[in-house]
Image (cartoon, grey):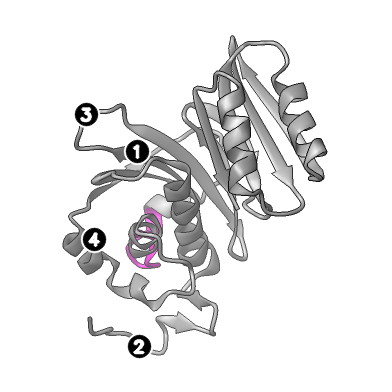
């Protein structure tokens, strides 16, 4: 596919521009989000807050978000033609200007929808400057994830021994936990476990099978 770009569309070798916050950061949010959800989605609604809502067309935030959910990284020049790639893949999308409350002005909430009728999945993230991001909501649970380290995400109903179970498996297999955080919302718990090195597939499967998780994902 031909790429129509001016010198103002691509800045340096690691980012499709024009803005690190509104383009590169937006793409990274969407790229991380698509790794967190189940594959097979065919529609995404993007709820744009603050300056994202005001400038998303001029700064290419719309193209960056669509490119991100297609799996393109911030440096991928296919972002420039993201809408065409979405059409080829049969992905539909909408941009909705909204107020998401007391959040960073560069924030987007993404609703991933599936053709088989399963429940939509929502993920929210903010671009906090210089291409850095924070994912601050997933599956209705508030979190704080900066996408810098290999990370396990686990959601479950209140039950005893989950932290000890996960910690013991990681310890016994030689993994160092950089940070572990829990977020509680009533009887629902979100456990976020950041590691110092990538997690092997067999260890992930061992953790996944050991407890009654409502949701578990690993991003390396």
Of residue 3 and residue 11, the one placed in the foreground of this image is 3
Answer with mark 4 or mark 1, whichever residue precedes in sequence.
4
Q: Are marks 3 and 2 in contact (CB under 8 Å)?
A: no
Residue picked out by circle 2:
6
Q: The N terminus appears in which quarter of the rendering?
A: bottom left
Precedes in sequence: disc 2 or disc 4: 2
Mark in the foreground, 3 or 2: 3
Is residue 208 shown left or right of residue 75?
right
Question: Which residue has dot 3 on it?
Answer: 117
Q: Is residue 98 above or below residue 60?
A: above
The answer to whether residue 145 is seen in the rendering is: no
Q: Position of residue 26 (x, y in %)?
A: 47, 58
Q: CA distance from mark 3 to mark 2?
A: 41 Å
Contact check, label 1 and label 2, Cβ < 8 Å: no
Q: What is the x, y in percent for residue 133?
A: 59, 53
Question: Real-space Cα distance between discs 4 and 1?
Answer: 16 Å
Residue 65 locus on image (x, y percent): 38, 57
Measuring 60% from the left and 40% from the top, which residue is drawn there? 204
Which of discs 1 and 2 lies nearer the camera? The answer is 1
Residue marked by disc 4: 86
Calculate the distance from the C-alpha at mark 4 to the C-alpha at mark 3: 21 Å
SS of the residue under disc 2? loop
**Which label is found at residue 111?**
1
**Residue 70 falls in image quadrant:** bottom left
Question: How far apart are the two marked residues, 1 and 2, measured between alpha carbons?
Answer: 32 Å
Magenta span covers which residues? 54-62
Which of discs 4 and 3 lies nearer the camera? The answer is 3
Q: Earlier in the sequence, mark 3 or mark 2?
A: 2
Label 3 residue SS: loop
Side of 129 where 117 appears, left or right: left
């Amino acid at each position: 596919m031909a790429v129509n770009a001016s010198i103002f569309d691509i800045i340096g070798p690691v980012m499709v521009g024009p803005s690190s916050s509104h383009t590169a950061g937006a793409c990274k949010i969407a790229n991380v989000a698509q790794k967190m959800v189940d594959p097979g989605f065919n529609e995404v609604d993007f709820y744009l807050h603050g300056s994202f809502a005001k400038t998303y067309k001029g700064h290419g935030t719309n193209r960056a978000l669509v490119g991100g959910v297609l799996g393109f990284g911030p440096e991928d020049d296919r972002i420039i033609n993201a809408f065409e790639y979405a059409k080829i893949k049969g992905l539909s999308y909408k941009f909705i200007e909204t107020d998401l409350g007391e959040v960073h002005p560069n924030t987007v909430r993404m609703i991933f929808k599936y053709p088989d009728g399963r429940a939509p999945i929502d993920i929210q993230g903010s671009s906090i400057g210089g291409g850095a991001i924070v994912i601050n909501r997933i599956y209705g649970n508030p979190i704080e994830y900066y996408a810098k380290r290999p990370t396990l995400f686990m959601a479950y109903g209140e039950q005893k021994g989950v932290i000890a179970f996960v910690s013991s498996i990681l310890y016994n297999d030689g993994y160092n936990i950089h940070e572990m955080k829990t977020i509680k919302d009533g009887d629902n718990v979100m456990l976020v476990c950041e590691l110092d090195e990538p997690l092997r597939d067999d260890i992930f499967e061992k953790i996944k099978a050991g407890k009654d998780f409502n949701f578990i994902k690993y991003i390396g």
